[in-house]
Image (cartoon, rainbow, N blue to C red):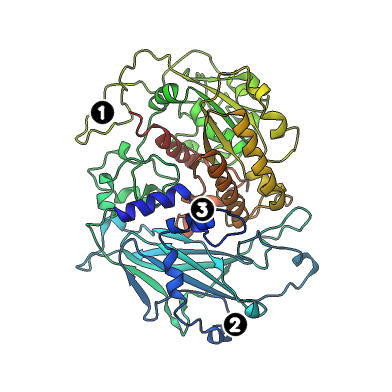
Amino acid sequence: MVYLLALVLASLYGVVVMLDYDTAALSVHTLLASADPCAYACREARREPLQMRMLEQSGEPIAYVVGSSQGAKTIQPQQCVCVRAVVPAEPARASNQTGYKPVPGWPTDSLMVDLVMQSSKNDDGVNDPLYADARVTVSVNMRDVTRNSDYARSHVYEGAAQLFDPGLYALDARIEFRNGQWNADPGLHTPDYKETPMRNTLPGNPLVPSQVHVLYDPRHATYLGRHQNLPLCTNGAAPGRWIPERNLPPTWKTWQYMSPAEDGRVWLPYACRLRRISHAEFVFHMSRRWPSVHWYGDSNSRRTLRPFVMGGKWCYEANSTARLDCLCNDAPKDLFPSEWYPGMPVPHWYRVHTNGVHSTEIHADLRRLLQEPTDPRPILDKDPSDDGDFGPAHVPPGYRLRDDYFDLYYRFTRGTLDMYGSHWERDITSAAVAPYQPASLVVVQLITWDAAFGSFASFKVDVERLANRLRTVYPRAEFVYRSGPYWCCRNSDDQAKKYSRLRFQSFDAHARNVFQRKLRARVWDVMSPPGQRPPESKRLSENMPCRSAHSRAEHIHLDNQVFMNMLVNGQE
């Protein structure tokens, strides 16, 4: 049970745990350090000499697993490894390369480092079909450990990773930005995204790859074959991995796991199970536990709310997911075009308040649809199952007529920024919400606009003020913090937007820490799962025609399932 406790702590504290080095940006570093299951890995790794002179002589950036001197470091499932990277210093050569500084406590160079499963075999040397072509990927968050005396020559980074699934893992390491250019504050030029592959072989032998071998143990609780023995997930930030749906045991029913992403992979947490929950079941439990939801967020929230107000009938058909609105476009006029949804009535278990939204938001488009109540997925009898769990057609006790609903008050906000007539100081007030039912649950989504147009220094101050305001306006409500979106591997659609992977992560890490500390908010993490996808899937999914920070429809449906699981499971 010790490892499950460590996983629960890690999922509860999310990025706070991963970034135990960031004492400048995260004030609870000392309190939470004990919750990091990998805190020991890089401390022990420092006993191995750095061999800086030998590394510098090669003149190329290198990433390797510390302790893999024989080619592969062997560990048990759930153990941790330390990855070290050495990047030769590169002075700024032009005027537009100067003036950049990383967010305090974050690396100077942006390195994307992943441990990627190459194969998985049992003790007899036979490939494990559960992991066939799975390419399980574990992202490694790197921290700067360069000594001041060495900084002019090389930058040294370390990061720890915990591995569970058995198999042989190789490093995929790339440089994204140098010299703090990933953090282009307003007024600075936005550099183009460009990946530089790093050498991933042994420091003293460029012909031998540096790898990790996780031993096969089918009795371990996190082994994929035992996944259905885990409890249901009740938090929205459970670490996990992506597994091809075709690999799953035939005894698993489709409602026992989430729908696959566009590459056919399913998100499966290590310490708990996610199930498919129907919108009808979700709304039933919401109407009783959280009958009034107030939601603040930008167009990412708007896209998140689309499947809810449509009862799941948004970009859900296989032949529709290639449409531009399903991929990334979110222009209000394209929300629900009549030629795509002819005669689609509004599911009547949501009541969207008109005064809580502007003409550019959801209600203006819903009014064009038929206003007759309907149930696009009728509730039938309870799904028969041997383990007592509920399928998507579960009839909750006491359920009678289809008149259950919860109030949704949605206000468009642009993070902490005052832009285009939207600002939280004017929009989040006791007077503004007084006409509506008191909120039992408040969902807040930030980051996208802040990372695009704001500075981290201002963001730190404003997030604290925003949290204080929310606590004043909603003294008795429960809070959910929805993380910022995942971003990688591309330029934005507008050079004025300062998007980068680490910029999104650093802003998000600080905000979620503030919301947990001040509001005891539950974290709904939509950023980490896409970051654990195999490198090729990650880049294919992220490089969309809009180059916006909007998630594609398949991922929004998956994100919403995580949200529904964290609120419904345990409420039956």
Q: Is 531 situated left or right of 494 in this image?
A: left
Q: Earlier in the sequence, mark 1 or mark 3?
A: 3
Residue ID at (67%, 27%) = 429
Which circle, 3 or 2, is nearer the viewer? 3
Q: Is 507 situated left or right of 68 in this image?
A: right
Three-letter code for the amino acid on which mark 1 is drawn: Asp
Instruction: Report the Cα–Cα distance between label 1 and label 2.
Output: 62 Å
Q: Which mark is residue 59?
A: 2
Residue ID at (55%, 46%) = 512
**In the rendered image, the vertical position of residue 195 relative to residue 379, given as above or below:** below
Residue 507, percent across and down?
62, 50
Q: Can see residue 493? A: no
List the single residue furthest toward the front: 31
Q: Earlier in the sequence, mark 3 or mark 2?
A: 3
Q: Within 10 Å of the Cα at label 3, are there few (<14), some (14-19), or many (20+) other Cα atoms?
A: many
Tell me if label 1 and label 3 are in contact, CB under 8 Å: no
Q: Earlier in the sequence, mark 1 or mark 2?
A: 2
Q: Secondary structure at mark 2?
A: loop
Q: Can see residue 391? A: yes
Which of 447/254 is in front?
Answer: 447
Q: Which residue is mark 3?
A: 15
Three-letter code for the amino acid on which mark 2 is drawn: Gly
